[in-house]
Image (cartoon, grey):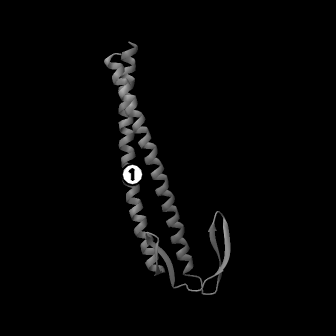
C-alpha cells in the first residue's frame, strides 16, 4: 500500500469520526430547540393564566394528546421544578423569570453547539478536499 493510500484511509477514518460527531451535535441542537419550544408554550400558558379566575374549569394536559378537566384552585402560585426533582411554589412572575433564565441558558447552549457543528463541518469539507486530491493522485 502506498503512502497516499494510507493517508486516504486515515482521512476516511477521520471523516467518519467527524460525521458521527456532527450527528451527535445535530441531535443536541434538535433537543435544545424542542426545549425552547416547550418553554415558549409554557410562558404563553402562564400569560393566559393571569386572565383566569379561581374555580374556572380548564383542560389540563396529561400527555400524548390526553387532557382532563380541572378547576383552578390557586392562580397566585404555580409549582416549578428547580432541578434534581425538587419543585417549589412561585408566583407567576417568578415562574416566568425562571423560564426566561432557562431560555437564555438554552440559547447560549444552542449557539455554542451550532458553532461546534460549523467547525466540524469545516473540517469535514477540508478532509473531503484532501481525500479527493489523493484519490485523483492515486488514480493517476
Residue placed under numbered mark 1 in the picture:
113
User: Can you give x and y, in whole percent of width and height, for residue 16 in the image?
Assistant: 42, 34
Q: Quadrant of residue 131?
A: top left
Tell me if residue 36 comes above or below residue 130 in the rendering.
below
The residue sitting at 52% across, 64% down in the picture is 38
Tell me if residue 131 comes above or below residue 139 in the rendering.
below
The residue sitting at 54% across, 67% down in the picture is 41
User: Can you give x and y, in whole percent of width and height, for residue 109 in the image?
Assistant: 39, 57
- For mark 1, give the secondary structure: helix
User: Which of these two is toward me, 83 or 37?
Assistant: 83
User: Outermost residue toward the front?
Assistant: 85
User: Can you give x and y, in whole percent of width and height, for residue 2 in the image?
Assistant: 33, 16
Q: Would residue 71 be found to the left or right of residue 77 on screen?
A: right
Q: Would residue 90 be found to the left or right of residue 66 on screen?
A: left
User: Outermost residue toward the top?
Assistant: 140
Q: Quadrant of the N terminus?
A: top left
Q: Quadrant of the C terminus?
A: top left
The residue sitting at 40% across, 50% down in the picture is 114
Circle 1: is it few (<14), some (14-19), or many (20+) Cα within 10 Å?
some
User: Which of these two is toward me, 3 or 55?
Assistant: 3
Amino acid at each position: 500500500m502506498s503512502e497516499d493510500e494510507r493517508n486516504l484511509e486515515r482521512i476516511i477514518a477521520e471523516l467518519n469520526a467527524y460525521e458521527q460527531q456532527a450527528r451527535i451535535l445535530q441531535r443536541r441542537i434538535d433537543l435544545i430547540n424542542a426545549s425552547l419550544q416547550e418553554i415558549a408554550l409554557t410562558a404563553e400558558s402562564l400569560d393566559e393564566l393571569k386572565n383566569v379566575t379561581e374555580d374556572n374549569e380548564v383542560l389540563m394536559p396529561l400527555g400524548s394528546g390526553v387532557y382532563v378537566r380541572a378547576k383552578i384552585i390557586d392562580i397566585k402560585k404555580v409549582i416549578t421544578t428547580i432541578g434534581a426533582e425538587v419543585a417549589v411554589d412561585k408566583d407567576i412572575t417568578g415562574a416566568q423569570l425562571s423560564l426566561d433564565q432557562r431560555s437564555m441558558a438554552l440559547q447560549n447552549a444552542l449557539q455554542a453547539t451550532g458553532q461546534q457543528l460549523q467547525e466540524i463541518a469545516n473540517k469535514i469539507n477540508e478532509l473531503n478536499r484532501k481525500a479527493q486530491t489523493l484519490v485523483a493522485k492515486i488514480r493517476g
